Image (cartoon, rainbow, N blue to C red):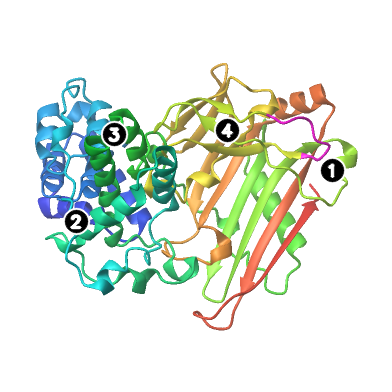
Amino acid sequence: MGIAVHTIDILLTRLLWPVPRVRMEAARALAALIKGGDRNVADRLLVWISGKKFESEVILGLNIIEAFDLGAYFTFDEVRNSVNAASHLSDWLMKANFAQADRLFPFRYAYAPPMRAELPEAVRGSFSAFNGVPQLFHSHLSHLEEQSGLPFSKRWQHEWEWLQAGELRRQGDPSYFFHGNREITGQFDFADRETYVSAYLRTLSFAAAEWGLPHSIAEQHSRAALTLNRGLAEVAPIDRPRWTDGILLGEHDPKTVASAIWRAASSGVAPGQMLAALRAVEVAEAGYAVFEFDVVTGNAAALASPDEPDDCRWSYLANPARYEGGFYSSPDIGFKPKPRRLCGKVLTLDVGRGLVDLIPHVHLPSPHADQPKSEIACLESGIEMQAGGSPIAFWEHWYSDWEPACPRKAHGLVGYKTTVKRDFVEAFCERNSLKTAVWCSVKSGTRQYRYTEFHEREEKFWIDI
């Protein structure tokens, strides 16, 4: 017996909730039910998509099919017929999953008429006041504007004004909710954001139809509006480790607390493995603490320096919108005497709006560690880095709380742990005459009342292991 319709609809409603993590968990639950053979869930998802008049809300549904590789559970015709607000991105998602999607025509894309929409000036002026939209959309349109000399940014506002003036108009003043800093706005993702994202997609449609922007370029830029990323969407958080509780500093010495955290985390590492990167977070009403650890490689003199080690060159996955496969690093600009972190950030071009708070925390060994042909595989329990088909490193994550907002300097509630094969690190160090040490950065804050400002401090140091 399948799950009840009203329960399915509750999950579908969560796809538009104001907290990105709620959206993510709802999408994961729906995908699991569809993969479990519940056809009723697939049908209700199609009905939900068909009822959406915002292009960006259509993407919320279609992206579940893409991110969780559900193409085999649907027919192309039923998915195509459910899309009533087509865009370059909705077509890209269908093409990525259905071979029959090679004859989707751009005339289906909507965009605003040339005259200006009739709006109260207070509403019109709120376009630029809304800072809840990711900067990525501004960056994409600014880039296109610089390349073409055409007013992409003004067109974005024009499309947004028509959405506000029409039947899709959202209630409320976005600047009221999003004025101020990240501590107030947190990770909130109000429905007003979908107006901006749909206007962005319509701007690309207009530019392709009226300004001669190649559809391939419009499609490429449309992927900024993805909500999920195949591979990364499958990686579920683990239970929060017990040793991350009670790490608020209070009157304790940061170095003493940091050493205790590192020892506790290292004690759970499997034989033959070693801890290479770690992030532990705790947030309470009156305080917070963020501990970030990195194994660092360098010569003895460099590791004796109090200077902060260099970051690794960032690594990028070569396959857009897929967080799996091979990757390449940005060019190395030459040897520096300063020590370098063993692990670096692994990025892809189109990670998805629902995962932007998670992606900066994925840390795996950098290609500078003699692994230029490494592959990355996403598992439900974490992300595995492989060399020659054998695993050499593993990354897993957890959340410190369900709170939708967190202190600005905490930069998210994600905790993570990266483990690496010990003989891999030892062989790398031996080949390059390097030693290892552990660098720790601690950010903390205290306050008297929940809504007052934090008294914050930051400390960085080497710890003994």
- Closer to the camera: disc 2 or disc 4? 4
Q: Is residue 123 left or right of residue 3?
A: right
Three-letter amino acid code at the position of disc 1: Leu
Mark 1, residue position: 303
Q: State which quadrant residue 196 falls in.
A: bottom left
As helix, strand or loop, the secondary structure at mark 4 comes to: strand
Q: Residues within 10 Å of mark 2 (few under 14, many from 20)?
A: few
- Closer to the camera: disc 1 or disc 2? 1
Q: What is the residue that sits farthest to the bottom in this orientation?
A: 448
The residue segment tinted magenta is 332-339
Assess whether mark 4 and mark 1 are in contact (beta carbons under 8 angstroms). no
State the CA–CA distance, disc 1 to disc 4: 24 Å
* First reached walking from the N terminus: tag 3 or tag 2: 2
State the CA–CA distance, disc 1 to disc 2: 54 Å
- Closer to the camera: disc 3 or disc 4? 4
Q: What is the residue that sits farthest to the right in this orientation?
A: 301
As helix, strand or loop, the secondary structure at mark 2 comes to: helix
